[in-house]
Amino acid sequence: METRIGWDLTLAALLLSFALSMVVSWVYVTTYIGLSYVRSFATTLAIGGVVSAIVMLAIGDDVARGLGLVGALTVIRFRTTLKDTRDLMFAFAVLSIGVACGVLAFTIAILGTAVFCGAMVYLSFSEFGSRRLYNAVLRLQVPTGPEEQRAVNQVLAKFAPSFVLINMRDLGGGTQEHAYHLKIRDAAEKGQILKSVSAITGVSGATLLMQDTSIEP
């Protein structure tokens, strides 16, 4: 027999699903790193939980309604492709929150949201899963004398915990072009690095390229 719930409990389930979905969407926007941010996906996350809660509230304990929903979903074609697996997890999260609210499992919805958001914040701002050893490339022209090259190494050691010479090219006239991979402690010091390196006698053409931290080779 179908179990009916009152309008007050229905409204509470819908409002809670929206509030929790907003929290998930806010975490997504705050922790997003990359160049392909889409605002519409963030708004979709904010409302996705409400939609799944409506579906679950409408079905209730009615098996026939559930079968009808399955049949309806087979007709609808979802052609939107998520390029990032992280986005897929956020989409699943808001749908799961809506399902939990729709079946009146409010405790599961609240605790699940808290754990999911806390885990995403930790994983986004920690270095978990990263294998990046260097985050910048420095190119410059250096005299072939050992004193100048030693001075360059001293400057790099001051700003970068680790660095390696990856390319060396002879330009003639007692000048070489060097390319270094750097692991910079603080990206805000990139201006100081260029200034200090360029101050070395004979060094010229110093350029620093910061690698995209959102892409892991």
Image (cartoon, rainbow, N blue to C red):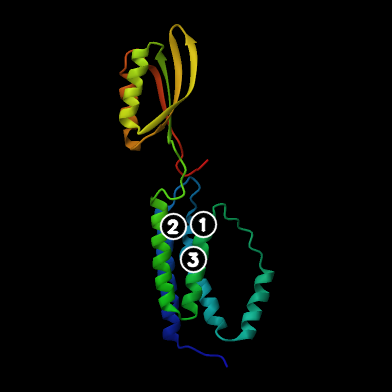
Quote the CA–CA distance across marks 2 and 1: 8 Å
Residue 73: image location, x then y, percent: 65, 71
Please tell me whether mark 1 sits on a helix, a strand or a loop.
helix
Above or below, comparing residue 204 to residue 136 in the picture: above
Left or right, residue 79 beside residue 154: right
Whether pointer 2 and pointer 1 mark residues with C-beta atoms closer than 8 Å, the reply is yes
Q: How many marks?
A: 3
For badge 3, the amino acid type reads Ala
Whether residue 33 is situated above or below residue 50 in the rendered picture = above
Q: Residues within 10 Å of mark 3 (few under 14, many from 20)?
A: many
**Amino acid type shown at disc 2:** Tyr
Q: Point out the tag, 3 or 1, that comes first from the N-terminus.
A: 1
Q: Out of 28 and 187, give the one closest to the viewer.
A: 187
- Amino acid beneath label 1: Asp
Residue 70 visible? The answer is yes
- Image quadrant of residue 72? bottom right
**Label 3 SS:** helix
- Residue on which the image places disc 3: 93
Residue sitting at 57 percent across and 55 percent down? 82
**Of discs 2 and 3, which sits in the foreground?**
3
Q: Secondary structure at mark 2?
A: helix
Q: In the image, residue 193 lies at what x, y percent?
A: 33, 27
